Amino acid sequence: MMKRVDPTLLYTAFSGRVISFLVADGLSYPQAWQLTLDSFAGLIDKWHEFPVSPSEAELEIFASVLNVLDNFLWRKQHGLDVSLPDVSLPDDEFSDKRKILLEAIAELPSAMRTAYALSRCGRLNIRNIAKLTGEETCDIVRHISRAKEKLARKVKDLKYV
């Protein structure tokens, strides 16, 4: 019998990255911690479904977290129960640019948003993203480059896109 990956160990390994991303996105630490805990709670319930390989399990973790982040962006875009404290942001100009960028990411088509988010937030390489999404590597490269182009057009005054 093959040994399965324990998702509680994966939570320990990856929760810090996810919380850091959400805090950088403007959430308070307690909000980011709760959102991350909620996303991993579903994964821990399905622990028997995790693949044997830790690298494949990592892809599963990022796919699940991406769904949570998509939900977060959608709720933020539609103004539903998402409080983003601007106190942690240096100034209003930076806050406005962050909102513009998040709205532009939320408006991307699903395949582009997934490929872009996995490459930027999950720091996954093209091959791993292709394996996770089931698409060819050339399609992933095209999705990422088109996402960058669309984001650049939407937020042309932002230098960090």
Image (cartoon, helix red, strand yellow):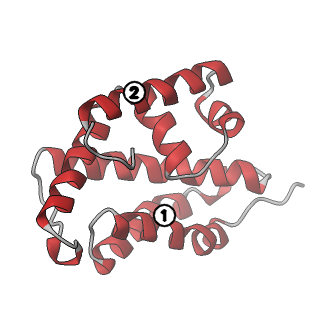
Cα gap from disc 2 to disc 1, whole angstroms: 32 Å
**Furthest residue toward right:** 1
Which residue sits at x=28%, y=73%?
A: 31
Rate crowding at label 1 as few (under 14), some (14 to 19) or many (20 or more) other CA atoms within 10 Å: many
Provide the secondary structure element on which disc 1 rests. Answer: helix
Residue on which the image places disc 2: 149
Q: Provide residue 110's location: percent of width, then percent of height.
A: 38, 29
Callout 1, which amino acid?
A: Phe
- Please tell me which residue lies in front, 159 or 134: 159
Circle 2 residues within 10 Å: few <14, some 14–19, many ≥20: some
Eyeballing the image, is 113 above or below 80? Answer: above
Where is mark 1, residue-wise?
Answer: 40
Q: Earlier in the sequence, mark 2 or mark 1?
A: 1
Is residue 48 rendered to the left or right of residue 84?
right
Of 124 and 11, nearer the camera is 124
Whether residue 33 is situated above or below residue 148 in the rendered picture: below
13 left or right of 93 in image: right
Residue 117 point in image, percent of width and height? 46, 44
Vertical comparison of 112 with 25: above or below: above
Residue 156: numbered disc: none
Label 2 with label 1: CB-CB less than 8 Å = no
Q: From the top left corner, tell me how far across and down residue 88 is, in percent.
A: 23, 77
Instruction: Give, as a three-letter code, the residue at label 2.
Output: Glu
Location of residue 126 by image quarter: top right
Q: Residue at x 49, y 52 (%)?
A: 121
The image shows residue 126, relative to residue 24, as above or below, that is above
